[in-house]
Image (cartoon, rainbow, N blue to C red):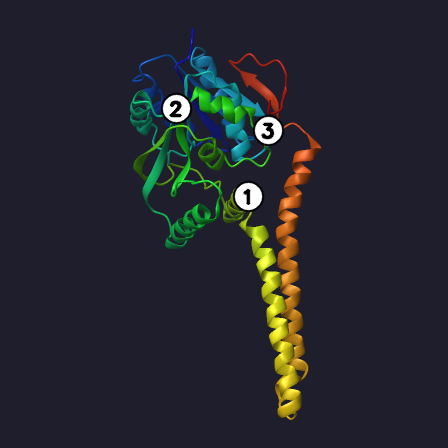
Amino acid sequence: MAVHYSLVIPIYNEEAVIPELYRRVKGVMDQLDGTTELILVNDGSRDRSLPMLRELQQQNPDQVRYLSLARNFGHQVAVTAGLNFAQGQAVVVLDADLQDPPELILDMVAQWHQGYEVVYAQRISREKESWFKRGMAYGFYRILRQLADVDIPADTGDFCLMDHKVVAVLNAMPERNRYIRGLRAWIGFRQTAVTFQRPPRYAGTVKYTFRKSLSLAINSLVSFSRVPLRMATYLGILSGLLSLVMGLLVLYWRLFQPNTLITGFAAITIAMFFLGSVQLISLGILGEYIGRIYEEVKGRPLYTLGEVGGVDAPAVTRCPP
């Protein structure tokens, strides 16, 4: 039987959330106007998440499928694995922590029936989050939108509905450093937003730590913008101009103010530190891009599968097509 809707949910150490997550998702699935499959992707969890996914699949073998990655490959790769196996005419991606309300899927489906091929959830508020996190998120999305080569909507995550045509294009893209919301914007097609107030995490601990969030932010900038490379060039030009100005000033002070102290050791030290910092920043920017080239040319599988349930996948390794 053809599947109308696929729901893809990455799971990482979510044993405290899974029962409530399934209850709410199942309630939405029962309201959808077609056959539905739920694809739960275990991203190398160390708690009881995997046994709980097995139990759910055994209780509802007609709708529930699960994939278990052989280790923790990261959120974006886990989402990609789910998309590789999704068979629905419309595919919904949402997080397991219930900060992406499953009930919003019904509004997304309504927009899909109106002819939109990508319907993304856009946050208008964040409940019970620190002012620091809200401020950082607000600034990041707007900086990314200004610097990126494509228009990535602000205040959006991976929570979205995509038509099977869009998913097919995403699955055909061989990129390893994947930023799903950016790739989703790059692909095009008719897109629209559904706004919502983001609730706090239902239970458990936050999985996107500051370090992981920073890594994702850097990955998004490097993947969708060449501005950092231009910034290295601009910094080089700026340092050259400042060095020229400093040279002229030193010459002036030597000729007309020979007793000034600024031409001594302090001025030389400041100039050395400035030029050294420009060089290190430039090398760091180049390293980010070269590192991604290195990852792409190795040609390793994007992820490996340790176990599957409810899907026809005898192989334990998957690569992007």
262 or 127: nearer the viewer: 262
| Residue 42 seen in render | no
Instruction: Please identify the residue farthest to the right as the structure is shown.
Output: 298
Where disc 3 sits, the SS reads loop
Q: Residue at x 34, y 13 (%)?
A: 34
Q: Residue at x 66, y 88 (%)?
A: 254
Where disc 1 sits, the SS reads helix
Question: Residue tagged by mark 2?
Answer: 22
Splitting the image into 4 quarters, where does residue 188 fall? top left
Query: Is residue 110 positioned above or below 76 on the image?
Result: above
Where disc 2 sits, the SS reads helix
Return the x and y of residue 199 as percentages of the image width and height.
33, 39
Please state which of the two labelled residues, at mark 3 or mark 1, is closer to the viewer. Answer: 3
Splitting the image into 4 quarters, where does residue 247 fall? bottom right
- As drawn, is 99 to the left or to the right of 271? left
Question: Residue tagged by mark 3?
Answer: 174
Between the C-alphas of marks 2 and 1, the distance is: 31 Å
- What number is the disc on residue 219? 1
Between the C-alphas of marks 3 and 1, the distance is: 16 Å
Splitting the image into 4 quarters, where does residue 23 fall? top left
Query: Is residue 213 positioned above or below 118 on the image?
Result: below
